Image (cartoon, helix red, strand yellow):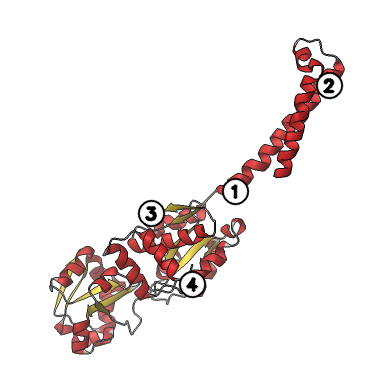
Amino acid sequence: GSFIIALFSVLADQFVSVFQHENALQRLFSQNATQKQKRRVYLNLAVFLLLLLASALWLIPRNAIEEKPLVVATKPSSEQYILGEILSLLLEKHHIPIKRAFGIGGGTMNIHPALIRGDFDLYVEYTGTAWVNTLKNPLTQKVDFETIKKRYEKEFNLLWVGLLGFNNTYSLAISKGDAQKYAIETFSDLALHSPNFDFGAEFDFFEREDAFKGLVKAYRFHFRSLHEMDINLRYKSFESHKINALDVFTTDAQIKELDLKVLKDDKGFFPNYQAGIVMRKEIIKKYPEALEILEKLDSKINDEKMQDLNYQVEALKKSPQIVAKDFLESLGL
């Protein structure tokens, strides 16, 4: 690049000197130039324009490649905003330019096709969503991460960069006081004592075969009462003692806020929703260091840590960027 610029400067000086020599430019316009002068001017003009074109072809695409940022996408949730900032800040720290496309409506349904088109470059996905929604496997089949990785690369030219370490799946929760009172650790334990519990969940949880209907068949729950409600009212109903058992996502901020006991799904009814980074394979060509940088996050966030990060944003009202920055600093990243 610097060689081209230096050569351009030298030839530009030469070009100007040609015009100055014996008033060649003035003679050319007044049609008094000799054939020798005309050839000399035209030749230098051709060389100058050719060099100008070569410089444009050399410099413009090069700058475009170097300056085009990677686009990090997220789904519209606090957890995804935090994870998006973790990816973005970590890559930016290593001088990789980033554009944030956070809060994409429709989640996987819109992000996955956009990733394939090249509109986005990377995002955090969940294995259960990839297994069922993207790869169209039945829920009855156990989620197999190795199969997910192979099929994503083969069918979509996308890479899974390990797993972050937490599993944001469905579970059931009760108060720690009730857990201690009835010695409840698992779903099976809760089933034995279910006549002592009023269970609440969102509307569609009760309607789905892969949720309450299937759960009752697997564990034989006989709750004292059932309460269908809006998903955002579950925790408020628990606080007001309308219910004392509910469905949760294992990284919900309210688990920490209400100090709930998350029970173990001892029969493995719910599929795993392990979080991992999905990225376009073409990124490696542009930024070969990106893969190694992102692999530093492998297994660094467990369920409790993700709960805490969500709690900081949702309950303490910190910004996702600040929470992500503090988290990376705690890891020395």
In the picture of the structure, the residue carrying the numbered disc 1 is 65
Q: CA distance from mark 3 to mark 1?
A: 25 Å
Query: Where is the N terminus found, in terms of image quarters?
Result: top right
In the picture of the structure, the residue carrying the numbered disc 2 is 39
Residue 75, labelled with which disc?
A: none
Which is in the foreground here, disc 3 or disc 1? Answer: 1
Residue 273, compared with residue 94, is above or below; it is: below
Mark 1 crowd level (few <14, some 14–19, many ≥20, 10 Å Cα): few
Residue drawn at x 59%, y 48% is: 65
In the picture of the structure, the residue carrying the numbered disc 3 is 104
In the picture of the structure, the residue carrying the numbered disc 4 is 298
Which is in the foreground here, disc 3 or disc 4? Answer: 4
Q: CA distance from mark 2 to mark 3?
A: 62 Å
Which is in the foreground here, disc 2 or disc 3? Answer: 2
Residue 3, compared with residue 225, is above or below; it is: above
Residue 97, compared with residue 2, is above or below; it is: below
Q: Nearer the viewer, residue 188 or 94?
A: 94
Give the image location of residue 11, x and y in percent: 77, 32
Whether residue 137 is visible, yes or no, is no
